[in-house]
Amino acid sequence: MPVFWGIGDHGGGATEEDLERIDAFMRRTLDVKIIHSSTEKFYQALRPYADRAPVVEGDIQRVFTGCYTSLSRLKRRAVASLAEITQAESLAALAWWSGNMAYPAEQLHDAWSNHLFNDFHDILPGSCTEPAERDALDQYGRASTAARRVRMGTAAALNGGKQRKLYIPVTVLNTNPSCPRVPVEAECMLDLRPKWTGTWHLKLYAMDGTEVPCQEEQPESLLPFNGWRRKVSFFADLPHAGAARYELRIIEGPPAKNDIVPAINHSIDPLSGLIMSLDAGDGRECLTGPMFQPVVVDDDGDSWGADRWSYRTVLGRFAPVPGSFGLVHPGPVRRIVESAFAWGASTMVIRTISYPMWPVTELQFRVHWNEKRKRLKLAIPTVFNEESVLCEIPGGAIHRPADGEEHVHGRWCMLEGAIDGRPSALAIINSGQHGFDFRYGEIRLSVLRSAAYCHEQGYTLSDPPSRKYMDQGVHEFRMLVTAGDAGDVRQRVAGLADWLNAPPAVYTHLPIGEARKGEMVPATTKGATSFFGLSAANVRLCACKRSDDGRALIIRLQETSGSGRNALLAMAVPKLSLRLAFQPFEIKTIRIDKKGHWQEVQMVEEN
């Protein structure tokens, strides 16, 4: 039996007084043998009894439902930071592997240290004070800065060699094998100086001169200099792990009229701007009402949500602002519509982005939240009146019950059932929104909650004095929706979550070099550099890094659909084709040396 000791639940170390008391207890306790030990020795001691041990399936405990949502800024930054550092580490490992740059071990260590510090049990769960929240956001900022510097260095290293003469070079770095064809955004200046007269637009080309369809959209800046700052969006065919390169060219005259209406699978109410119908294919309707309806519910819980198991008392619903719905950007790549909503002292803008060649609808939310002791949920009424919803958890997935109580999930949740006798599914992928409830086919995602900072329910709140409440102010977050055959949706949700939280890095200012003779990973005719490819969309890249001993490349993969899969990992240098058989949710760690020797190794020891 393990007995853990220290200073409360905060992990305090041993003190002399503690040790003296424990030694005295050990001397006077004769019926039990007490030893100082470790968790490793404890598990070794239990090994002979493993065949008689009970098997526990599902969660061990569920507590503090407020912590699924509290301090949502930290929740979102945690998800994005993890994805961003993993992406930077993978790119750095590939550049090091090709011999183009030294491995930035110190910078990556600094990024990971700052990120992991915030996993402390009163920071990430959102039960800390407001000054601690600011400190934690600073920590994530420092981690992000380190990751971006590493990523920038990688991009420069991979673009080495004799420079090509290009008008505006575009480099796109990808480390998501599950989503090699995705939408990409790029911003740049039209020219070194404004074009004060005339009409101009941009066209995008691959390195072999092939034109790539793109559309211009409103950039972040609102400069009046005759469209000096530009933004384009396009679909990129990316290497599974590597770099794709393009050129933007300036063209005189207006762009061609090619505002194609996307072949989308949903319809939008022109009065509210909300999605009213969602087709899983062949007319299989998924919804029974407006999707992502903003709902305000009562939330009188403390920071932890102690003794609060559900949040179902609806106080009101955000109403659309009359005349706010409109088409923002039409075009061949995507179609963007926007609508505004208001409730009480709070406002919200929702952008719905439709893609003609991608089975995904993207939603961008900008919320100005000014409520106290209330919770914002997004309601999605569906035809899936099932007993449970499938949710991502660390290392796998789990079914949560349709009981109307608040439950937790990872980056995605999925509703499954038969529509017209055909297995169908609807999945929602998030950017750090982890609380939800599900009942009668309607899922309600918790996105904001305004409990008092670091408030425990035993302390009675009163005004005055004034109190500080969580999540007030401006919030921006994104979600993806995909629907279709249940098996297909399961295959793609994890890859979409990786894309949403760490999209490919785009640079419109780095020179692009010609492939050098003898380079380990030569460029293809279209200017792409590919390090490896992966044949299965439901096998995600969890990590790519230099081994701890500095002599090999570590690639960590996981099966994500729960169905098992055989996958082919094709390495460019050394030229290898590894056939890997995955059990459901299995994680494999592969070690590859420069001579082409490879083996499966343990995750921690790497041997």
Image (cartoon, rainbow, N blue to C red):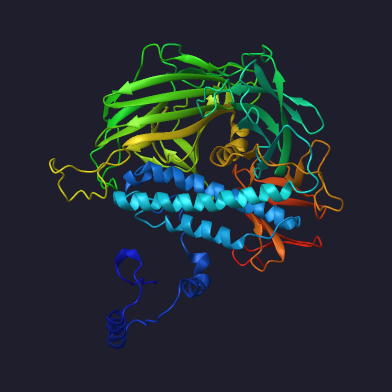
Please name whichever residue, 209 or 520, is drawn nearer the observer in this view of the structure. Answer: 209
Q: Is residue 318 visible?
A: no
Q: In the rendering, at what x and y percent does residue 348 appear?
A: 38, 25
Please name whichever residue, 338 or 30, is drawn nearer the observer in this view of the structure. Answer: 338
- Count numbered badges in the picture: 0
Instruction: Please give the name of the residue rendered at 41% of the width and 15% of the height, measured from the top-left corner.
Output: 324
For residue 57, above or below residue 197? below
Question: Farthest residue in the right direction?
Answer: 517
For residue 464, above or below residue 336? below
- Left or right, residue 174 beside residue 390: right
- Left or right, residue 179 beside residue 310: right
Q: In the rendering, at what x and y percent does residue 6 appear?
A: 33, 72
Q: In the rendering, at what x and y percent does residue 173 appear?
A: 67, 42
For residue 202, above or below residue 470? above
Q: If the image is split into quadrants, where does the N terminus sit?
A: bottom left
Instruction: Please give the name of the residue rendered at 53% of the width and 65% of the height, measured from the top-left corner.
Output: 51
Q: If the image is split into quadrants, where does the C terminus sit?
A: bottom right
- Left or right, residue 582 beside residue 340: right
Please name whichever residue, 42 or 347, is drawn nearer the observer in this view of the structure. Answer: 347
Instruction: Please give the name of the residue rendered at 77% of the width and 52% of the height, measured from the top-left corner.
Output: 578
Please name whichever residue, 488 or 267, is drawn nearer the observer in this view of the structure. Answer: 267
Question: Farthest residue in the bottom direction?
Answer: 27
